[in-house]
Image (cartoon, grey):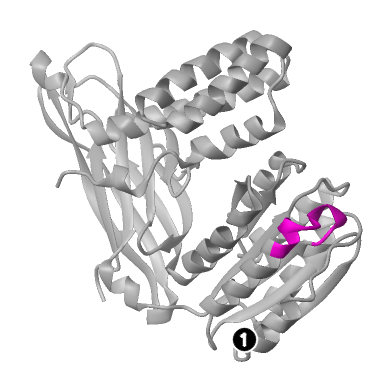
C-alpha cells in the first residue's frame, strides 16, 4: 500500500537574501512511518547481556532483576528472549526461547547474583549467538548493561562490529560512574545502536521497558535517504536530531547526489534530520534546489524498495524584512545542534590539553542551553566549567551527563512544524 512513510521538509530561512556570496541553508527533514504502521507488529528478539560483577551488588543487581522481569511481561508468544549474564565468566541464564512461559523465565531471572570481575566481550559474543538461534527474521536487539571497566576494549569493539554486520543494534547502558562511556558509545555506533547513561539504579526499569517498546514499534527497515541537489547547492553536513543528536555524515553518489543510510524507523518517533547546505547566489525568485527521497522496506507487508519523495524549494529576495524571517522551530534545533557541537569540541580540547579552549566552548554551550530552557543540563555544565577553572579537570559524572544529555535536547514536540 502507498504512504507507509511520510516525508516533510522545512527550511530555517525560507527566503535567502540576494547576495554575491554563497550562503548556508538549514533544511529540516522529518521522516515518519504513517499512522497505518502502528497496526503492523514484527516479531521481536531481545538478548539481555547483563553485568553481574561484584560491583553490581545491592540496589543495582536488584533493579536489574526487576527490570528484566518486567520486560518479559511486555513480550508475547511471537517474541524471542534470551538472558546472558557475565562477570569474569559467561553464563546463559535463559537460552533463546519464545516467550510462552513467562513465569519460568522470570523464575530464572531471580537467580541473578553478583560475583566476580567484568569481561564484557564474551558476554556480547554469546548474546549475539543467542540472537541468531532463531534466524534473522523480525526485529533484533541486544541490551547490554554494565557498571564497570573492562580490560578487553578492543575485543568489545570487534564484537560490536559483528553485531553491526548481523543487523543487531546494541543498546549499551552504563549505570553509576565507574565505566568507560567512550567505549559504550563506540560499541553502539558500530552496531547502529544507542548508548546511554543511567545515573541512578532505579531508572534501569524505565530504560529496559523503553528499549523493548521501541523495538516493538519498528516495522520499517533498510530505510535510506538520498538527496539529489541541483548545480550550485553543496551538502556540508547531515545531522540526526531525533531520536538523538549525531553526525550521520553521507556517502557521495554522484557530483551532486548523496546517500545517508537510516536503517530502522519507529512509529511515533521516526527520524528527524538537519541538513546543512551551501547555496550559490541567485537572482530574486523561487527555485527548486533539490529532491529528498527515502527508500524503505516493510517486511511484514512484503514490501521492498518503496519510496517517498518531495521537492525542496527555496526563494531569494531583495527585501531585507523577508530575508530576516525564520522558522523558529528549525532555528531552535539549529541552536541545539550547535550546543552539542560546542560540548563535543570542548571535550576534544580537554583531551588534547587545551583547558582554556575547552572552558570557553563550554561557557558558550551553557549560554545556548540556557536560551533553550535546558536549565538542569546548563547547571551541570556550569559546574564543570567551575571545576575546569579551579582544577583543570571535569568530573566523571559531569562528563557522562554532558556527552549523553546534550544528545537528547531535541524532543518530539520540537518537530511540530507549521503545515
| Horizontal and vertical percent position of residue 277 | 35, 30
**Could you say where residue 295 lies in the image, as x and y percent from the top left?**
37, 61
Q: Residue at x 53, y 38 (%)?
A: 405
Q: Which residue is mark 1?
A: 102
The picture quadrant where one finds residue 411 is top left
Determine the residue located farthest toward the bottom in the rendered image. 100
The x, y position of residue 387, in whole percent, is: 66, 17
Q: Residue at x 28, y 35 (%)?
A: 330
Closer to us: 233 or 249: 249
Position of residue 113 in the picture relative to residue 261 (left or right): right
Q: Which image quadrant: the N terminus?
A: bottom left
Above or below for 5 versus 42: above
Q: Is residue 399 visible?
A: yes
Specify whether residue 231 is in view: no
Majority SS type along the magenta span: helix
Helix, strand or loop under label 1 = helix
User: Is 387 in front, or is 121?
Assistant: 387
Residue 27 highlighted magenta (yes or no)? no
Q: Quadrant of residue 211?
A: bottom right
Question: In the rendered structure, which segment of residues is drawn in magenta?
Answer: 52-62
Q: Is residue 329 above or below residue 85?
A: above
Please, is residue 153 above or below residue 166 in the view? above
User: Is 403 displayed left or right of 125 in the figure?
Assistant: left
The residue located at (60%, 48%) in the rendering is 196
Residue at (23, 51) in percent of width and height: 310
Q: Is the residue 70 above or below the residue 190 in the image?
A: below
Amino acid at each position: 500500500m502507498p504512504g507507509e512513510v511520510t516525508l516533510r521538509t522545512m527550511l530555517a530561512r525560507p527566503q535567502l537574501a540576494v547576495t554575491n556570496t554563497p550562503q548556508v541553508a538549514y533544511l529540516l527533514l522529518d521522516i515518519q512511518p504513517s499512522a497505518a504502521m502502528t497496526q503492523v507488529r514484527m516479531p521481536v528478539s531481545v538478548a539481555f547481556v547483563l553485568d553481574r560483577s561484584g560491583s553490581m551488588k545491592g540496589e543495582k543487581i536488584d533493579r536489574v532483576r526487576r527490570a528484566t522481569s518486567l520486560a518479559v511481561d511486555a513480550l508475547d508468544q511471537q517474541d524471542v528472549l534470551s538472558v546472558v549474564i557475565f562477570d569474569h565468566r559467561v553464563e546463559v541464564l535463559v537460552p533463546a526461547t519464545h516467550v510462552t512461559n513467562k513465569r519460568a523465565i522470570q523464575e530464572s531471572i531471580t537467580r541473578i547474583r553478583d560475583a566476580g570481575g567484568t569481561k564484557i566481550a564474551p558476554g556480547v559474543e554469546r548474546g549475539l549467538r543467542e540472537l541468531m538461534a532463531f534466524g534473522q527474521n523480525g526485529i533484533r536487539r541486544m541490551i547490554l548493561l554494565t557498571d564497570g571497566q573492562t580490560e578487553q576494549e578492543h575485543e568489545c569493539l570487534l564484537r560490536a562490529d559483528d553485531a553491526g554486520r548481523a543487523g543487531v543494534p546494541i543498546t549499551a547502558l552504563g549505570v553509576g560512574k565507574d565505566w568507560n562511556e567512550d567505549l559504550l558509545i563506540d560499541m553502539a555506533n558500530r552496531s547502529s545502536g544507542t548508548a546511554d547513561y543511567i545515573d541512578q539504579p532505579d531508572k534501569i526499569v524505565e530504560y529496559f521497558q523503553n528499549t523493548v517498546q521501541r523495538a516493538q514499534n519498528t516495522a520499517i527497515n533498510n530505510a535510506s535517504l538520498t538527496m539529489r541537489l541541483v548545480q550550485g547547492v553543496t551538502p556540508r553536513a547531515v545531522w540526526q536530531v531525533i531520536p538523538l543528536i549525531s553526525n550521520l555524515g553521507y556517502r557521495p553518489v554522484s557530483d551532486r547526489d548523496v546517500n545517508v543510510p537510516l536503517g530502522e524507523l519507529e512509529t511515533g518517533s521516526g527520524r528527524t534530520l538537519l541538513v546543512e547546505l551551501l547555496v550559490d547566489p541567485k537572482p530574486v525568485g523561487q527555485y527548486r534546489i533539490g529532491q529528498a527521497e527515502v527508500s524503505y522496506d516493510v517486511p511484514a507487508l512484503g514490501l521492498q524498495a518503496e519510496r517517498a519523495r518531495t521537492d525542496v524549494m527555496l526563494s531569494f529576495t531583495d527585501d531585507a524584512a523577508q530575508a530576516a524571517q525564520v522558522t523558529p522551530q528549525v532555528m531552535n534545533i539549529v541552536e541545539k545542534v550547535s550546543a552539542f557541537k560546542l560540548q563535543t569540541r570542548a571535550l576534544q580540547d580537554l583531551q588534547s590539553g587545551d583547558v582554556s579552549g575547552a572552558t570557553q566552548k563550554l561557557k558558550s554551550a551553557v549560554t545556548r542551553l540556557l536560551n533553550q530552557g535546558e536549565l538542569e543540563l546548563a547547571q551541570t555544565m556550569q559546574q564543570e566549567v567551575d571545576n575546569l577553572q579551579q582544577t583543570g579537570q571535569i568530573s566523571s559524572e559531569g562528563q557522562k551527563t554532558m556527552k549523553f544529555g546534550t544528545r537528547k535536547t531535541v524532543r518530539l514536540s520540537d518537530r511540530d512544524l507549521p503545515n
